[in-house]
Image: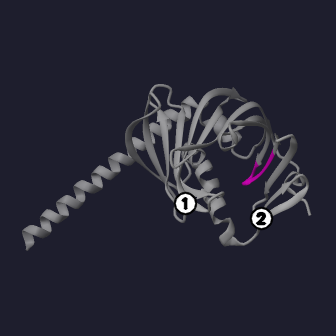
Amino acid sequence: MQKAALAFTALALLLGGAQARADEEAKKVVAEAVKAHGGAEALAKMKDKSSISKAKLIIPQLNNLEAKMEIFSGAKKFKHEVELSVNGMDIKQITIYNGKSLVVSVNGMKVIELTKKEELEALEEAIFAEEAAGLAMLGSKDIEMSIIGESKVDDTPVIGVRVTKKGHKDVSLFFDKSTHLLRKIENRGMDFQTQTEVGQERIISEYREVDGVKRPMKVIVNNDGKKVAELEIIETKIVDKLDDDTFTAPK
């Protein structure tokens, strides 16, 4: 019995050491990513900034229909304006999340309003997945990181790091082994059209420097391996703060 207990203790110590090494390896991968994306100082300056981006949105479900999109982002809030034409009808959809509610309007008419905590949980998970890379590269004390291993995104060799935060689902980040730039984000999330949980991934590419930080100009979004959106950023402007009116939903 004593020998068994000692063997179990030795195994636990070995496993603990392996986990510690894995965590250190994850930190090394992220440290390289920090340098590749512009450095700790430049990334820290962006932490509390807001941004306005103009983009082209491609929607595969609508025969790769192209739409114009403007994205306002800041302080856990966002506003998306999408303009498209379907069968000769011009449509403008505005989505606003102000931290307390999500409102979607189409051609000035409110079609969705979510205000209850349980209604917003899936959205908050999606926001965490988007923020995970920033939290890792800024050295947040609220997360833990562990190494996943090597794989490929398309033909690009990558190495993965898992980000864990209490109260949230894990997010996996995959960094290009050559350039050390973020190449893919994976997480479990809600497909808001089908209201079912799916495996989500964002394939990230075509980086450009904006105010000293490398930012992706192309993002492909897949749900359970099926492309649901493709975003091409045309221009991005960094601002100190967006007016509160930006995130005021129509009544």
Quadrant (top left, top right, bottom left, bottom right) of the N terminus: bottom left
Could you say which is closer to the camera, residue 143 or residue 125?
125
Q: Is residue 233 visible?
A: yes
- Indicate which disc residue 197 carries: 1
Model colouring: one colour
Could you say which is closer to the camera, residue 67 or residue 34?
67
- Indicate which disc residue 101 carries: 2
- Region of the chain picked out in magenta, as a range: 74-81
Q: Amino acid at mark 2?
A: Ser
Outermost residue toward the front in this view = 87
Could you say which is closer to the camera, residue 45 or residue 79?
79
Label 1 Cα neighbours within 10 Å, binned few <14 / some 14-19 / many ≥20: some
Magenta region, main secondary structure: strand
Q: Amino acid at mark 1?
A: Glu
- Relative to 177, residue 8 above or below: below
- Does residue 158 appear left or right of residue 187 in this picture? left
- Indicate which disc residue 166 carries: none
> Is residue 63 covered in magenta?
no
